[in-house]
Amino acid sequence: MEELVTQLIGYLRGMWRFRWWGLALSWLVGVVGCAMVYLMPDKYESSARIFVDTQSVLRPLMSGLAVQPNIDQQVAILSRTLISRPNVEKLITMADLDLGVRSQKEREALIDSLSNSLQIRSADRNSNNLFLLAYADTQPARAQRVVQSLVSLFVESGLGSKRQDSDAARRFIEEQIKSYEQKLMEAENRLKEFRLKNMALLGSSAGDFVSQIGKLQEQLEQARLELREAENSRDAMKQQLLGEPSSQEMAPPVAMATPEIDARIDALKRNLDDMMQRYTEQHPDVAGARRVIAQLEEQKKEQVAQLQQSATSAPMSIMSANPAFQQLKLALAEADARVASMRARVGEYESRIQQLSNSARMVPELEAEMTQLNRDYAVHKSNYDALVARRESANIGVEMSAQAGIAEFRLIDPPTLPTKASAPNRLLLLPLVGLAALVAGAALTFLISQLRPAFSDGRALREATGLPVLGTVSMLSTPERIRARRRGLLVFSGGLASFVGAVAMATVALMVIQR
């Protein structure tokens, strides 16, 4: 601590050696600074207060029906973005500030100056809807014109931005509605084509096909059993027919006839008539009966031809057909017809089962595709309905804004014509200039003392050189030197006091003049 005090005393002694330099610089800085403060041009500030009322009576009434943007947020953003280059250029034209502009450089300087001078801030800390618009200029009338133009621009920008936002939103919604309307039509067409293509399968589920397959399986087993019975009966008849002679010798008949074949044909036709009452033309039994009848007709023609040929070659005696053989043959033909009919039935059942199995395997895929198509359609329909509802809500919001207004701009305090200068604050600047002059004088003395150092005692000399100091010689002060030192001190004190007094008098005089 003692070393610090000693060092501080050494600095003060060094500065005291060059006190006249510091006093001279203080007077110089003070005089120049005061002159500059007095010569600074006066600026007159004009201001206006605007209240933005965002609480409309219709807002709670139309809640949920109309689009209601966040007006408070929009107004806050407007207040921060109003001072942009396009708006400043428009403001210059509105306030006739470009009448004296000669070049583009001067115009750019005017734009920069105006952008830095315009003020838009909240006038109340407790409310974000009260704004203060201010501008300071060397000419009071011009400051008033600028603020008036700024008020107009503030109101127009607020209303214009709302209209532009509403129009842009409506255009976007209309475009989206057209897009989703096209998507909805495409989804409807895909769904319609899918239903028409798979109409026979969409009405049934996999369980229905399984039930039908089960019933057909039972009918198929029954048909197979009847087929085996018919085949066994036919095979027995074939064995019996092999042991029976087919003809016997007798006198030639007077007339040629085929009573056995005719009887079989008549029996089959009666059976066919009975089946036509129960089945359709496509039924396997009907088709088999017709096929057997056609075979018997052909067989009758062949037998008549054979009888005619036999009568011609052996007119005296012929071999007559064995009646028992003919009956067995007739029964065998019926058995063949029944076997053919049962085979056709078995084949039909197997074909139907195969078709139903294929259809049952396709049902899950079709249902999944149908679900996907319905999902796409439902999504497009939901988005389309939501967009239509938003469009109606936006239209209601626009109409509400046009008729009642979502936000109302109220001019609380119109722009005033200032009569007193608001800047510069000379009462504050003059004391600051005096203080700055004193600081500058002290800084100069400290700088010179560091550039031209001197040792005030032996200790400082020993620490600076690192050499031993054997002793010091003190200066004896004579009465003449003491009186001279006192006169110098009085002169310095008087100069310093005069400087402080001059600054104080200048400040008091300025206060009197401003009153």
Image (cartoon, rainbow, N blue to C red):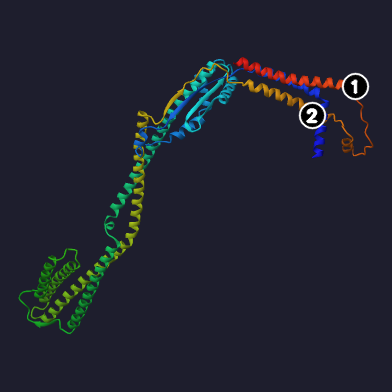
| Image-based side of 59 in relation to 475, left or right | left
Determine which of the numbered discs, if any, sits on residue 446 in the image: 2
Q: Where does residue 19 sit, x and y in percent of width and height?
A: 80, 24
Count of marks overlaid on the render: 2
Q: Residue furthest left?
A: 254
Residues at marks 2 and 1 touching, judged by CB atoms closer than 8 Å:
no
Q: Amino acid at mark 2?
A: Phe
Q: Where does residue 387 sit, x and y in percent of width and height?
A: 36, 41
| Image-based side of 445 in relation to 177, left or right | right
Residue at x-position 34% and y-position 47%: 187
Camera-nearest residue between 36 and 282: 36
**Residue 374 can be seen, yes or no:** yes
Residue bearing the label numbered 1: 479
**Residue 322 can be seen, yes or no:** no
Query: Can you tell which quarter of the image residue 163 is in?
Result: top left
Q: Where does residue 127 sit, x and y in percent of width and height?
A: 47, 32
- Label 2, residues with CA under 10 Å away: few <14, some 14-19, many ≥20: many
| Image-based side of 465 in relation to 439, left or right | right
Where's the N terminus, which quadrant? top right
Camera-nearest residue between 487 and 282: 487
Q: Amino acid at mark 1?
A: Pro
- Image height of 402 relative to 218, above or below: above
Say whether disc 2 or disc 1 marks the residue closer to the N-terminus.
2
Q: Where does residue 26 sit, x and y in percent of width and height?
A: 75, 22
